[in-house]
Amino acid sequence: MSSKGHGPQPAAQKEKICKLKKDGKLEEIAKLSMRPIVYCSKCRLEADNPSVLCNPRALKQK
Ligand SMILES: [Zn+2]
């Protein structure tokens, strides 16, 4: 039937840094929070991208 060989998704999504913190991957967190624009209101982590936080909130910009 289907002639498409590609899977649905290559699973290239970033892990949540909230989870990285639990795993102790502080270097990975640092890479994802070089210029933070959002923070996690649950875990109190900062990140460049809201998609890596479990409960993202906008940081107040100066
Ligand atoms: Zn979180």
Image (tube, rainbow, N blue to C red):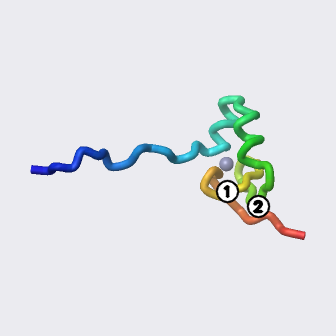
Q: Answer yes or no: do the residues labelled 2 and 1 have beta carbons within 8 Å?
A: yes
Kindly identify which residue carries mark 1. Answer: 49
Q: Nearer the viewer, residue 12 or 43?
A: 12
Q: What kind of residue is marked 2?
A: Ile
Relative to 59, does residue 45 appear above or below in the rendering? above
Q: Secondary structure at mark 2?
A: loop
Q: Secondary structure at mark 1?
A: loop
In the image, what residue occupies the spot 16% across and 49% down? 3
Q: Residue furthest top?
A: 24
Relative to 18, does residue 59 appear above or below in the rendering? below
How many residues crowd around disc 1 within 10 Å: few (fewer than 14), some, or many (20 or more)? some
Q: What kind of residue is marked 1?
A: Asn
The mark nearer the N terminus, 2 or 1, is 2
Which image quarter: residue 62?
A: bottom right
In the image, what residue occupies the spot 67% across and 33% down? 22
Kindly identify which residue carries mark 2. Answer: 37
User: Horizontal placement of 22 versus 2: left or right?
Assistant: right
